[in-house]
Amino acid sequence: MVEKFFITTPIYYPNREPTIGSAYTTIAADVLARWNRLKGKKVFFLTGLDENSIKVSKAAKEAGYQDVQRYVDEMAKKWIEVWKKLKISWDGFIRTTEERHKKVVREFFRRVWEKGDIYKGVYQGLYCEGCEAFLTESELVDGLCPLHKKKPKPLSEENYFFRLSRYQEKLLDYIEKNPDFIQPESRRNEVISFIKAGLKDISISRPGLDWGITLPVDESHRFWVWFDALLNYISGSEGNWPAELHLVGKDILRFHAVIWPAMLFSAEEPLPKRVYAHGFLTIDGQKISKSLGNAIDPIWLAEKYGLDTLRYFLLRHIPFGEDGDFSEKALVERHNGELVAELGNLVYRVLSLAERYQGEIKGEDELSNLLDFERIDKHMERLEFHHALEAIWDFLKAVNRYINEREPWKLEGEELAGVLYNLLEALRVIAILISPFMPDTAEKICQQLGVKLGNFQQLKFGRFEGKPKKGEMLFKKISA
Ligand SMILES: [Zn+2]
């Protein structure tokens, strides 16, 4: 049977257009989806929009829309447009205002209700509108929400509660027995201490709202947005649940690693195999915000520097689990060094040599033993994109050294054919390996080689079947 790989991004609030932050997560998910397709897995890649949030209905009103649905419909078009431009290869797209989603939320709630895990109570607490969540005193910094720098409002109201506390022991036990469930390790430890400090029941509804999904047992209440949003992973799954991997930012790990599994325990649904929290992205050392202007717009960056350079840089420069800084200066350096001088130059050199050779290209494999695919794949499995790219580049550098050692420009006849055979096969393999990161560049290399882009079954050197024809340089140097 073909192994499945169901990967998700968080669903995003369409109260603004995508930033480099949401593009970062989504590009990472796209690379993993493409990588696993090349491995022959049955991939389902899900992304979407979290449209039922108060934040979204506020943004609609601020933008002059009376009809929130019309606003989210228009924003959804913009998001899809951006993901297409960034070559995101999603298989499923879920919007939480879709009927198929609402149906799943209500059915799921019913099951949790029948389990006896929902009750009505009074909530008194400090509510942060930015977080759309109640905060505890201990979470505040100088009386303010640490994320939104705003004073949360005291709020007392009747809510429906989910008995999160009931699942504390079961959850701890599960996390201990499944060491790979939460990654990276440091985040896993944070979640464990958080649970050990004691889980409180959480409010999952609010009365008196005019946007969101109503509770099936009480029409005057609407779902707290997270209870609703997390269920996108099932409502959008097209029968692929459970997910093999949820990619999330570290700020929303608790929802995914504590509340979500408890909800699934209650409804007796299987848990996702793995939840991976990546770090925060800053721009030149600053938090992503509107004041940074164009620098946070992924389309502006892709048009200025090239999409593949942007995709490559994001995953090569920043170790995925850690916080990292995005700077155009660092991007230009890597572009000129790694993409122009190393990759682009190698392709150009080899194709120039191949062009002036007329005979049949054949020889003995002298290079493929320098490629350590297992090592690259292991890094991808651990979401160490930067190490995977490093390992691909090790092969690329070995190919460059091979040219310098063999000096093919001094060779003729069979000897030249043998070296060319190795170089062209190496480029064919490099194109396959980089294609998840840089789909356009991989395609261009294949065009110049006159071959079809292969998959990981075709990493071994075979007969070179192409018809090489030199094209333009893959990357142009950017002057700093
Ligand atoms: Zn907040």
Image (cartoon, rainbow, N blue to C red):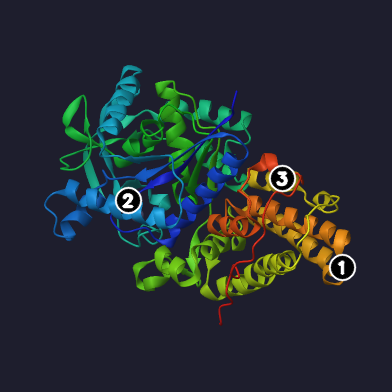
Mark 1 or 2, which is nearer the eye?
A: 1
Question: Looking at the image, which is closer to me, 159 or 209?
Answer: 209
Which mark is on residue 411?
A: 1
Query: Which of the marked residues, 1 or 2, is nearer the chain's N terminus?
Result: 2
Circles 1 and 2 in contact, beta carbons < 8 Å: no
Query: Which of the marked residues, 3 or 1, is nearer the chain's N terminus?
Result: 1
Instruction: Say which amino acid is labelled 1.
Output: Leu
Mark 3 or 2, which is nearer the eye?
A: 3
Q: CA distance from mark 3 to mark 1?
A: 27 Å
Dot 1 falls on a residue whose secondary structure is loop
Is residue 198 visible in the rendered structure shown here? no
Quadrant for ligand 1 reads: bottom left
Q: CA distance from mark 1 to mark 2?
A: 60 Å
Question: Looking at the image, which is closer to me, 212 or 185?
Answer: 212
Residue 450 position by quadrant: bottom right
> Can you give x and y, in whole percent of width and height, for residue 93 in the image?
37, 41
Query: Which of the marked residues, 3 or 2, is nearer the chain's N terminus?
Result: 2
Instruction: Say which amino acid is labelled 3.
Output: Leu
Instruction: Say which amino acid is labelled 2.
Output: Tyr
Q: Which residue is mark 3?
A: 459
Dot 3 falls on a residue whose secondary structure is loop
Residue sitting at x 36%, y 18% = 115
Name the side, left or right, on which 403 lies relative to 345.
Answer: right
> Can you give x and y, in whole percent of width and height, for residue 258 in the image?
47, 36
Name the side, left or right, on which 116 lies relative to 20.
Answer: left
Dot 2 falls on a residue whose secondary structure is loop
Which mark is on residue 13?
A: 2
Question: Looking at the image, which is closer to me, 183 or 74?
Answer: 74
Question: Looking at the image, which is closer to me, 362 or 183?
Answer: 362
Check the image and report above or below for 478 versus 437: below
Q: CA distance from mark 3 to mark 2?
A: 40 Å
